[in-house]
Image (tube, rainbow, N blue to C red):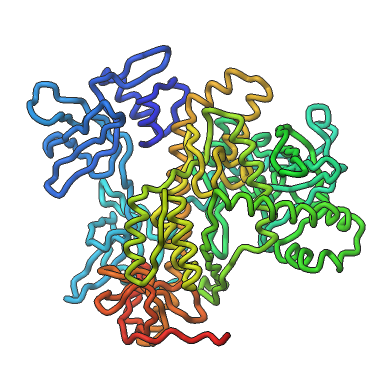
């Protein structure tokens, strides 16, 4: 459900509402659809809020939100201009016989406020405007302008209600339009509003320690360091490990100190939810004055931090004490992953500077500790070999090269430290902000197993979903198709999400898990920081406000996370499709990753990660084949290929 729908169901105060929901609230008041129960406003029982689903016959229904309710039928005459996917308030029709039914009173949230489309001439020579998401013809009007006069391939942003052109985004011939299309399709923002920028400029540019030492723990003497990608500009986290007491300090940027409730920056961060990362550029959740400056835990400067302090048992490495507090730190060194991998490999033989030697005195032992933690975690959690393809984009926004990024010891070192802090934060609450990953349905995995048996992958006895996954992975490894099968397993799993109630994290094998360590780039973490601070301050009023609205906030950030990820994937696909457009008619080695009616194959060439659609009549899963690229639809970011021949698996010399 949408955040406002959750508020209408669970109850809310008028002061809790987002600006975007106030008009709908006022209309519901005028309809006398709300009542006050225990001091909170709720929909009256005769009304229901939910997403409208419309079938091919034009009949709609609103799903039940509880087991006690029934789905409500909405006849075409009772739609009130609502469309499939809209969040609506409906009123039950009591007198009508038959299936429980209702009529739409109010559209709370439109499923699509606008569409992104482009102009083209079809095969018969007729002018068309094509919706990029659906590939179907649509309509558009532009006051004082004949849209046909634009160059073919012009990309438009169109109001779905009025068909008015809201913006001319660019032309498909220009590689720079890809960025704008991907952002627009998934409603990701680029520039910040002026009030947000003005507030960011007013924030202090450096930390004056004397102003904070009385209220914070002074950790500036500790040899904190950061470990991030070479290209990183915002540093969320720094670590320090006390060898004497076996205590890990995970210092996180104290964003909540600088971003106040309801401020322009906070409102914008809530709208964005996440920083979106394209290969050549990031689109931050916070203005760069904060994300890359005062909040960022840069080396050699004082910074405010929110610290998770975790004491470990020397023998079991289990946490014996976990606490959170506000602090001041002074990071002594910024490392990148490549540097740390070299240091781990040669045990710091090239390090000469005294402060760096002090850091390595704890960092190298900590790496061994985190390796043990990882090994233990994988006894209940899973290691999926998903390869990330990194794209390199030049100044003209054209794809130059790709490379596969895999986890290294440096990545694992930081990851395990962050996992400890994230678990510690989740243990503080019974109701709060949790990162939840539900177990998969055994039937889903058995469907996957049935598909894999066609290529000769068989497993013996299994008891449940975890044992079946491990059995499949073991066989896949022996057949040298581990990464391909892991990708299929991931598709069969449920998506991780944010939730107010803790239901554990299946993939990691944790009973309690949340996101605490990245408040610069995730709004969920900022919420959690605020919630923990209300505990530390025993601020009952603020805690009640947060917990009253925590479920709609979790729904909001879950939805925004999906949008941000889809924008990133869409941009990647657009760049790979542009490259494919330069390869029309060429033949490539490939391997099949999806068989059947919608078969797909991944090219084996210098440009990695290119997925091509093929007709699946002649191929089976994981077949090694030759394909020819026939078409690259840049607008739809889709590549079509033709099966040429099967090829024998190459023999690897031992």
Instruction: Pinpoint residue 522: horizontal percent, then vertical percent.
Output: 56, 45
Residue at coordinates 61% horizontally, 30% vertically from top-left? 428
Q: Is residue 645 above or below residue 382?
A: below
Q: Is residue 30 above or below residue 355?
A: above
Report the front residue among 211 and 60.
60
Q: Is residue 297 above or below residue 233?
A: above
Instruction: Pinpoint residue 486: horizontal percent, then vertical percent.
Output: 46, 62
From where the camera sits, is residue 151 visible? Answer: no
Instruction: Pinpoint residue 630: horizontal percent, then vertical percent.
Output: 32, 81
Left/right of residue 203 with respect to residue 118 in the rendered view:
right
Count up the numbered dots.
Answer: 0
Kindly give the residue lying farthest to the left in the view shown.
97
Report the front residue among 319 and 235.
319
From where the camera sits, is residue 421 visible? Answer: yes
Image quarter of residue 629: bottom left
Instruction: Pinpoint residue 273: horizontal percent, then vertical percent.
Output: 51, 44
Report the front residue among 415 and 105.
415
Quadrant of image for the N terminus: top left
Residue at coordinates 58% horizontally, 53% vertically from top-left? 378
Report the front residue among 500 and 430.
430
Quadrant of image for the C terminus: bottom right
Kindly give the residue lying farthest to the front in the view shown.
461
Kindly give the residue lying farthest to the top in the view shown.
38
Left/right of residue 616 with respect to residue 358 in the rendered view:
left
Image quarter of residue 201: top right
Residue at coordinates 18% horizontally, 25% vertically from top-left? 92
Q: Is residue 437 above or below residue 541?
A: below
Residue at coordinates 48% horizontally, 81% vertically from top-left? 605
């Amino acid at each position: 459900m949408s955040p406002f729908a959750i508020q209408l169901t669970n109850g809310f105060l008028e002061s809790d509402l987002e600006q975007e929901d106030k008009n709908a609230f006022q209309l519901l008041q005028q309809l006398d659809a709300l009542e006050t129960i225990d001091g909170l406003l709720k929909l009256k029982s005769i009304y229901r809020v939910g997403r409208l689903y419309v079938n091919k016959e034009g009949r709609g229904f609103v799903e039940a939100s509880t087991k006690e309710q029934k789905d409500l039928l909405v006849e075409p005459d009772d739609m009130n201009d609502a469309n499939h996917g809209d969040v609506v308030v409906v009123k039950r029709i009591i007198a009508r016989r038959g299936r429980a039914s209702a009529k739409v009173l109010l559209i709370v949230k439109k499923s699509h406020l606008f569409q992104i489309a482009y102009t083209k001439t079809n095969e018969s020579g007729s002018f068309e405007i094509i919706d990029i998401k659906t590939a179907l013809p649509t309509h558009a009007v532009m006051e004082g302008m004949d849209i046909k006069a634009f160059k073919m391939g012009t990309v438009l942003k169109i109001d779905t209600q009025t068909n008015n052109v809201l913006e001319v985004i660019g032309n498909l011939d220009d590689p720079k339009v890809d960025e704008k299309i991907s952002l627009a399709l998934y409603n990701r923002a680029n520039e910040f509003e002026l009030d947000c920028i003005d507030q960011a400029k007013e924030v202090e540019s450096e930390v004056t320690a004397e102003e904070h030492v009385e209220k914070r723990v002074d950790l500036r003497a500790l040899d904190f360091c950061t470990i991030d990608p070479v290209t990183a500009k915002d540093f969320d986290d720094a670590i320090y490990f006390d060898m004497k007491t076996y205590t890990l300090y995970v210092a996180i940027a104290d964003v909540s100190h600088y971003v106040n409730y309801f401020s322009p920056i906070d409102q914008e961060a809530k709208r964005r939810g996440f920083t979106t990362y394209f290969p050549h550029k990031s689109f931050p959740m916070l203005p760069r004055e904060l994300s890359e400056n005062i909040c960022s835990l840069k080396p050699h400067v004082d910074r405010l931090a929110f610290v998770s302090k975790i004491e470990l048992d020397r023998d079991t490495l289990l946490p014996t004490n976990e606490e959170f507090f506000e602090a001041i730190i002074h990071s002594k060194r910024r490392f990148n992953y490549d540097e740390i991998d070299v240091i781990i490999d040669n045990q710091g033989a090239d390090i000469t500077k005294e402060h760096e030697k002090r850091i390595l005195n704890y960092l190298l032992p900590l790496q061994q500790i985190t390796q043990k933690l990882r090994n233990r975690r994988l006894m209940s959690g899973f290691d999926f070999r998903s390869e990330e393809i990194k794209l390199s984009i030049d100044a003209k926004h054209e794809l130059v090269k790709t490379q596969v990024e895999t986890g290294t010891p440096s990545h694992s070192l930081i990851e395990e430290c962050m996992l400890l802090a994230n678990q510690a934060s989740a243990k503080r609450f019974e109701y709060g902000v949790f990162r939840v990953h539900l177990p998969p349905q055994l039937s889903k995995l058995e469907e996957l197993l049935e598909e894999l048996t066609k290529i000769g992958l068989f497993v013996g006895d299994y008891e449940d979903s975890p044992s079946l996954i491990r059995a499949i992975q073991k066989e896949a490894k022996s057949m040298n198709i581990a990464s391909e099968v892991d990708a299929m397993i991931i598709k069969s799993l449920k998506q991780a999400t944010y939730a107010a109630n803790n239901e554990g994290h299946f993939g990691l094998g944790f009973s309690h898990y949340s996101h605490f360590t990245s408040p610069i780039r995730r709004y969920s973490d900022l919420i959690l920081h605020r919630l923990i601070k209300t505990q530390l301050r025993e601020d009952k009023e603020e805690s009640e406000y947060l917990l009253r609205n925590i479920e709609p906030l979790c729904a909001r950030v879950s939805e925004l996370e999906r949008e941000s990820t889809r924008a990133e994937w869409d941009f990647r696909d657009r760049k790979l499709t542009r490259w494919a457009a330069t390869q029309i008619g060429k033949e490539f080695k490939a391997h099949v990753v999806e068989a059947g009616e919608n078969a797909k194959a991944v090219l084996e060439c210098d440009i990695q990660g290119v997925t091509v659609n093929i007709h699946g009549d002649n191929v089976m899963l994981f077949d090694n084949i030759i394909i020819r690229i026939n078409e690259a639809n840049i607008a739809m970011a889709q590549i079509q290929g033709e099966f040429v021949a099967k090829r024998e698996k190459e023999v690897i010399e031992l």
